[in-house]
């Protein structure tokens, strides 16, 4: 019983804490983000299993975590507002060539992040070549270039 | 699907974003408070004396108990007992039922000569040739919640203490 309760608590906690951290939380922008993710994984493992080293414990825990994931996806499919609350939605950061500074500030991203995505995804060189930049719910910034005239 | 500027199909929900930003900023405050509380000692495993480590002396001034107010489940912590003005070479220490049932004693330094359990608790008998003795219990709580323990020393003076065990 304890394993399952631990699994549910940790699942919900991680879901909430990463949502509170913002869209860019899990996006591996720097090497350190990756290191941080590893440390969190290691810490979580202790809380999940405690001193239970049994196969039964692991199997129950995996079933619990996958089960929670299935439950979440079913709820998201059924209730649209639930999906939005859990996953968030896309947000326009650069609108028709114009940077929306208040949104950048609130989401803790900057021009350099947009330019990085522009280079990576579209091979663009300057900000004025971008028509729209959108912060997606998974933390990536997608770019729509200006149409060439 | 909504169209932004008549061309970009995007399901942007600004109301939700604004609400999320507010909740995020409130949560940062809560996290900061939690960290401060933990640094002060409200969550166990160290902190300021008087908050996490409590010292208590029996009415007869012969027993000094130092215990942790907050413990964490399945995590070992110390409970230290100082006995003074000993009139016997075989001092005893009694702990009430909660201590036996909800704690696992990992180690006692020095080791007791004799351990006896009864229906209402456990009695340890030590052996010493000195008038003062310092005994440390390394305990691991097994159950979550509040723990109420009565401790009785060799001269029958008692100390009541309570510990809270976090999950």
Image (cartoon, grey):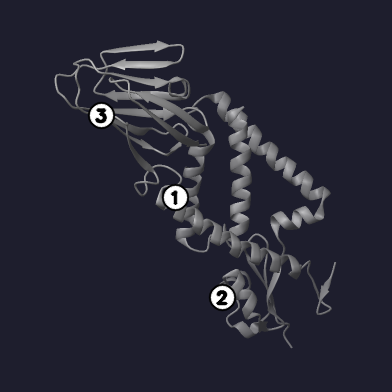
At 79% across and 66% down in the image, what residue appears?
A: B11
Describe residue B87's horizontal placement relative to residue A57 as left or right.
left
| Residue B56 on image: x %, y % | 33, 36
Number of the front mark, 2 or 3: 3
State the CA–CA distance, disc 2 to disc 3. 66 Å
CA gap, disc 1 and disc 2: 33 Å
Mark nearest the camera among 1 and 2 is 1
Circle 2: is it few (<14), some (14-19), or many (20+) Cα within 10 Å? some
Disc 2 secondary structure class: loop
What residue occupies the far left of the structure in this picture?
Answer: B129
Instruction: Pinpoint residue A78: horizontal percent, then vertical percent.
Output: 83, 48
The alpha-carbon separation of the residues under discs 1 and 3 comes to: 33 Å
| Front one among A72 and A5 | A5
Viewer-closest of B129 and B101:
B129
Tell which residue pokes out farthest to the front in this image: B60
Relative height, residue B108 to residue A78 (above, below): above
Instruction: Tell me the residue at 31%/22% (across/down).
Output: B153
**Which chain is mark 2 on?**
A
Q: What element carries label 3?
A: loop
- The residue pinned by badge 2 equals A110
List the residue tagged with mark 3: B62
Residue furthest out toward the bottom: A149
Q: Both on one chain, marks 2 and 3?
A: no
According to the image, label 1 marks what residue?
B38
- Drawn side of residue A48 relative to residue B62, left or right: right
Q: Residue at x 72, y 63 (%)?
A: A89
For residue A11, what is the image quadrant? Answer: top right
């Amino acid at each position: 019983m304890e394993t399952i309760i631990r699994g549910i608590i940790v699942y919900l906690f991680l879901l909430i804490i990463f949502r509170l951290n913002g869209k860019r939380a899990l996006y591996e922008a720097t090497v350190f983000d990756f290191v941080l993710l590893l440390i969190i994984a290691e810490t979580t493992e202790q809380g999940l299993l405690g001193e239970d080293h049994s196969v039964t414990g692991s199997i129950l825990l995996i079933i619990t975590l996958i089960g929670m994931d299935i439950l979440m996806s079913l709820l998201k499919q059924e209730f649209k507002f639930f999906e939005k609350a859990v996953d968030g939605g896309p947000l326009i950061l650069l609108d028709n060539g114009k940077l929306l500074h208040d949104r950048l500030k609130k989401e803790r991203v900057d021009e350099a992040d947009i330019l990085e995505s522009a280079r990576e995804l579209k091979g663009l060189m300057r900000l004025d070549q971008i028509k729209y930049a959108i912060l997606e719910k998974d933390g990536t910034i997608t770019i729509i270039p200006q149409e060439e005239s | 699907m909504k169209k932004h500027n008549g061309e970009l199909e995007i399901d942007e929900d600004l109301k939700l974003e604004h609400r999320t930003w507010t909740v995020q900023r409130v949560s940062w405050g809560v996290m900061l408070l939690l960290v401060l509380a933990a640094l002060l000692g409200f969550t166990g495993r160290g902190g300021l004396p008087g908050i996490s480590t409590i010292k208590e002396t029996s009415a007869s001034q012969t027993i000094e108990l130092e215990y942790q107010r907050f413990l964490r489940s399945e995590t070992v912590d110390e409970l230290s007992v100082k006995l003074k003005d000993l009139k016997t070479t075989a001092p005893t220490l009694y702990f009430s039922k909660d201590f036996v049932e909800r704690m696992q004693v990992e180690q006692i330094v020095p080791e007791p000569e004799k351990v006896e359990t009864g229906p209402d608790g456990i009695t340890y008998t030590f052996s010493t040739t000195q008038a003062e003795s310092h005994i440390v219990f390394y305990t691991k709580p097994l159950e979550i919640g509040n723990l109420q323990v009565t401790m009785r020393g060799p001269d029958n003076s008692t100390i009541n203490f309570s510990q809270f065990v976090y999950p």
